[in-house]
Image (cartoon, rainbow, N blue to C red):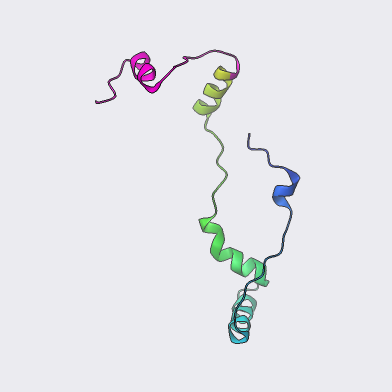
Amino acid sequence: MGAHSQAHHEKVKITIECTLDERTYIKMLAAKAHLDLSEFILSYLRSDFPQERKPNKETMEAIQELREGRGIKCESIDDFWEKMGMSPNA
C-alpha cells in the first residue's frame, strides 16, 4: 500500500508532433522559464495528475483492525445499514 515498484519512477520518452514553428516557440518558452522541454511541458500537466494520498490516522486504524480480523463484517449493503443502525433512505 503506497509502495511503488522501481519501474514506476523509470523515465520513458514520448513524442509530440508539432510544426517547426511550434517547436521553436515551445523551446523559447521553456528557455525563458529556465526549464528543459520535458520539465516545461510537465509543469503544465502535473496539476492534473492523480496525487498519491496517504490514508489518515482513522483510516489506518480501520485497515489495521481489518487485518487483525476485528471489525464488523457485512454481507450486503442492506446488512451494513442495519448493523450501523441507519436507514438507507434517511
Give the x, y percent position of residue 59: 51, 28
Vertical relation: 27 (above or below) 57:
below
Q: What's drawn in magenta, residue-wise?
A: 67-90
- Name the residue: 39% across, 19% down: 80
Q: Is residue 67 visible?
A: yes
| In-image side of 82 versus 33 (left or right) | left
Q: Is residue 35 visible?
A: no
| In-image side of 46 versus 9 (left or right) | left
| In-image side of 33 versus 74 (left or right) | right
Vertical relation: 86 (above or below) 45:
above
Helix, strand or loop for the magenta stretch, by majority? loop
- Name the residue: 71% across, 51% down: 9
Write down the quadrant of residue 16 in the picture. bottom right
Give the x, y percent position of residue 84: 36, 17
Write down the quadrant of residue 23 in the picture. bottom right
Write down the quadrant of residue 89 in the picture. top left
